[in-house]
Amino acid sequence: MSPDVTVLAAAGSAGQTAAIWVLAPISVLAALGMITVRKAVHSALLLAVVMISLAILYAVQDAPFLSVVQVIVYTGAVLMLFLFVVMLVGIESGEAVVETLKGHRALAWVVAIVFGIVVIAAFGQVTLRTAVGLADANQQGNVVGLASLLFTKYVYAFEVTSALLITAVLGAMVLAHRERLEPKRTQRDYVRARMRAYAERGAHPGQRILPGVIAQHNSVVTPARLADGTHVSMEIPGVRESSEPTPEELAAEEADEAEVSGRERAARASLRGEADDGEPGRDGDRSDREDSEVQS
Amino acid sequence: MTVNAFVVLSALLFSIGGLGVLIRRNAIVVFMCIELMLNATNLAFVSFARQWGNLQGQVFAFFVMVVAAAEVVVGLAIIVTIFRTRRSASVDDASLLKL
């Protein structure tokens, strides 16, 4: 063995030792977290941690191609798919805490621990020589080596894989497909319905008023008001429609407003030490009052 | 360096994945645990490929990844379909085949 190869092997071995000591605790903790956290999104993110750790462990074990595929296919595609389904199914679709089988959870822990101990102990019975390493097999490059195996010895399995993938695509399409039971509504249909509502009920056929139009602020929390301060009932955030005040409430509000603005005016006047700042301050007071009302 | 540590890590991750499949009731999380188990077996494949100095283990890990990708697609489609009809992602609610 030439000195170069020895140095390289030593460096590779040191890298492997460092990687396993750093990444093994991380990945085991992340995996334990994955099965214990309550939210599915957090599970998916912890699974990403495990998968990236595994990608690094592949990389230090002379499998650069698999390392990259792990990151692209698993961490990229599969986890994105998981997150999409979490989004579709709903994050709040929580976990049933009730045990359907009695003592099921405790037994599951026992089974898993016993299984882990048995596998690790069985492996402990085996004494392995020092790893041969992939320096020879990767002589022409890892990808070339994999490809020459894949397209000669395992070419049949490779072809069968294509059938599997096509079946999976078809299965996903069939399962996710939903038959359209009524014809799709076009823009023409929407306009017809709107005009019919206008003819029959007198509903406003035009666009609804955006929040903040004619109001003083352009924010969605600001209700649309007409120039005289009255509320517009057909603005877009529909929640405000029900809270439209009745005439009595409006009158009470007016009185309240007048009293408050009068008090404010008095307070300001006393602050400034002036007797009266006259009518021009009234509009400003009123808008302040309205703002605070909206905020509350 | 020998592959012992890698294989032990693989066994640990596989056990944790199996435990998750047993204790979790949310179908999506159960599915993630299955992915974890598949990843653990891949780690064992890659480690033993290095132990014996040939690439067949890595080819097998590659096939496992392909099959896992296909399985995820179909499995998640099934979960979405079940959720659409029963409004639940819990594995206890899909019990039509139970006697």
Image (spheres, rainbow, N blue to C red):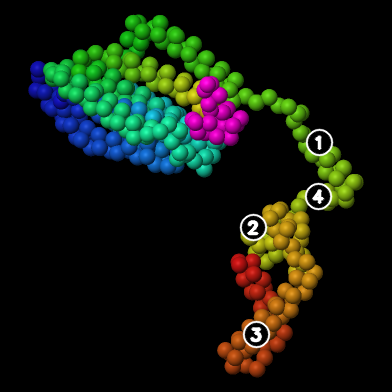
Q: Nearer the viewer, mark 2 or mark 3?
A: 3
Q: Mark 4 belongs to which amino acid?
A: Gly
List the residue tagged with mark 4. Answer: A206
Measure the alpha-carbon separation of dots 1 and 3: 55 Å
The answer to which of A255 and A36 lies nearer the viewer is A36
Q: Which residue is mark 2?
A: A220
Q: Which residue is mark 1?
A: A189
What amino acid is found at the position of numbered circle 1 in the picture? Asp
Q: Are marks 2 and 3 on the same chain?
A: yes
At 76% across and 52% down in the image, what residue appears?
A208
Q: Looking at the image, tell me whether mark 4 or mark 3 is earlier in sequence order.
A: 4
- Residue for point 88% across, 49% down: A201
Q: CA distance from mark 1 to mark 2?
A: 30 Å
| Residue A165 within the magenta-colored segment of the rendering | no
CA separation, marks 1 and 4? 15 Å
Helix, strand or loop for disc 3:
helix
Local SS, label 4: loop
